[in-house]
Amino acid sequence: MMAQQFETIALIGIGLIGSSIARDILDRQLAGTIVVSTRSEATLKRAGELGLGHRYTLSAAEAVKDADLVIVSVPVGASGAVAAEIAAHLKPGAIVTDVGSTKGSVIAQMAPHLPDSVHFVPGHPIAGTEHSGPDAGFAGLFRGRWCILTPPPGTDEEAVARLRLFWEALGSMVDEMDPEHHDMVLAIVSHLPHIIAYNIVGTADDLATVTESEVIKYSASGFRDFTRLAASDPTMWRDVCLHNKDAILEMLARFSEDLASLQRAIRWGDGDKLFDLFTRTRAIRRSIIQAGQDTAMPDFGRHAMDQK
Ligand SMILES: NC(=O)C1=CN([C@@H]2O[C@H](COP(=O)(O)OP(=O)(O)OC[C@H]3O[C@@H](n4cnc5c(N)ncnc54)[C@H](O)[C@@H]3O)[C@@H](O)[C@H]2O)C=CC1
Ligand SMILES: O=C(O)C(=O)Cc1ccc(O)cc1
C-alpha cells in the first residue's frame, strides 16, 4: 500500500495500458476514486466485471468532470477526438496526460482543445505486450520500465513533478525530453522493429502458398520472435505509422540503405564486413542485458506473454 496521490483519476480507454494502470492504482491505493470510460459498451462492461474502477461511463465528458488526473489511453489517432470531447468538462487545475506511442502528433491533436486552466503533460510508458483489451492488462507491467514525459515548454513544474511521482509509484523510471526527440528515438527502437516484423511475417505468408505449411512447421525461434511483434494490435500500429510518419520514413530510409549494404556484402562474399557487423550488434545485445534492460522485462511479463 502507498499513499493516495489523487482524489479522483479518470481513465479514458481501458485496454492493455489503461487496465494495467487501473490495476496498479487499485493495488497501491493511489486514488480515492477511479472513473473508467471507454467508447464501446462491451469493453466498459468487461472493465466492470474485472473490477477495474469505482464508476463507469460511456461518456468521456462525464468521466473527467471531478478528476484531478485524466489519463487518455486510446489509439493515437483518436486522441484529438477525445480531447475535443473532454475539454469543456475538465476540472480547473486537473492534470491531463496520455500514454500514446507517438508524441508530436498527440500534442498537435490534443493541445489546441485543452483549456489553459488544466496542465497538459504528455507521456509514454515504454512497456507493453502484443496483446490488447482490458483482459490483457496486468499489475506490475510498468515496474522497472521507463516512462517518458514530454511537457511543452512552460508547463507547470508541480504538475510534471506530480505525474513523475505517479509513474514512480507504478515502479517506472521517468525521463523528460522534447516530443521530436522522443519520436525519432522511438521510431528506431520500437516502431521500426514492429514494421520489420509485420513485413517479414507478411513475406513469409506470401511464400507459404508455395511452401504450404513449412513456414509454420519449421518456424525457428527467430521467426517466432517476429510473429509475436506482428501479432500486435492492427488499429494501434496503423495509427503509430500514420502519426509518426516523418521519423519512421527517416529511419526506414537509413534501414534500407544499410540493408542494401548487407545485401551487397553477401552477394560479393565480403565475410569480414558481415563478421564486423555481427560482432558490433552482439556487443549491443550484451550491453542491454548488462544495463538490466532485458531482465527488467520482468519474468511475470514474459510469463504473461507466453500464456496468452
Ligand atoms: N500496446 C502496447 O504495448 C503499448 C501501447 N501504448 C499506447 O497506449 C495507447 C493504448 O494502447 P493499448 O492499451 O495497447 O490499446 P487497446 O486496444 O488495448 O485499448 C485501447 C482502448 O481505447 C479505446 N478506444 C479505441 N478507439 C477509440 C476511440 N476512437 N475513441 C475513444 N476510445 C477508443 C478502446 O475501447 C480501448 O479501451 C495507444 O496510444 C498506444 O500507442 C503505449 C505503450 C505500450
Ligand atoms: O511488445 C513489445 O515488445 C513492445 O514493444 C511493447 C510496446 C509497444 C508500443 C510502445 O509504445 C511501447 C512498448
Image: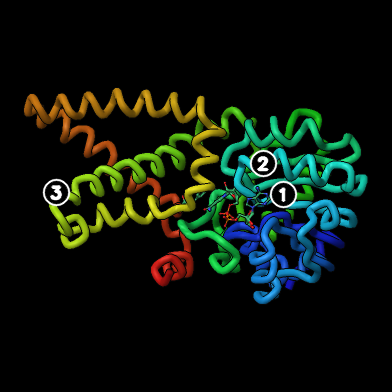
The CA span between labels 3 and 2 is 47 Å
User: What residue is pinned by disc 3?
Assistant: 210
Q: What's the residue at 17%, 62% (across, down)?
A: 217
**What's the amino acid at mark 3?**
Val
The CA span between labels 2 and 1 is 8 Å
Front residue (pair 259, 212): 212
User: What residue is pinned by disc 2?
Assistant: 149
Q: Residue furthest left?
A: 269
Instruction: Give whichever of discs 2 and 1 has the lower sequence position.
Output: 2
**What's the amino acid at mark 1?**
Arg
Taking 255 as reference, is 170 left or right?
A: right
Instruction: Confirm whether residue 135 shows in the render.
Output: yes
Instruction: Give whichever of discs 3 and 1 has the lower sequence position.
Output: 1
- Can you give x and y, in whole percent of width and height, for residue 3 in the image? 80, 67
- Can you give x and y, in whole percent of width and height, for residue 200 in the image? 28, 43
Q: Which mark is residue 60?
A: none
State whether residue 203 is above or below residue 51: above
State whether residue 234 is above or below residue 249: below
Front residue (pair 161, 251): 251
User: What residue is pinned by disc 1?
Assistant: 164
- Can you give x and y, in whole percent of width and height, for residue 92 in the image? 92, 45
Taking 140 as reference, is 13 left or right?
A: right
The CA span between labels 3 and 1 is 52 Å
Q: Are marks 2 and 1 in contact (CB under 8 Å)?
A: yes
Q: Are marks 3 and 1 in contact (CB under 8 Å)?
A: no
**What's the amino acid at mark 2?**
Leu
- Can you give x and y, in whole percent of width and height, for residue 241 in the image? 49, 36
Q: Secondary structure at mark 3?
A: helix
Q: Secondary structure at mark 1?
A: helix
Mark 2: few/some/many CA within 10 Å (<14, 14-19, 20+):
many
Mark 1: few/some/many CA within 10 Å (<14, 14-19, 20+):
many
Instruction: Confirm whether residue 24 shows in the render.
Output: no
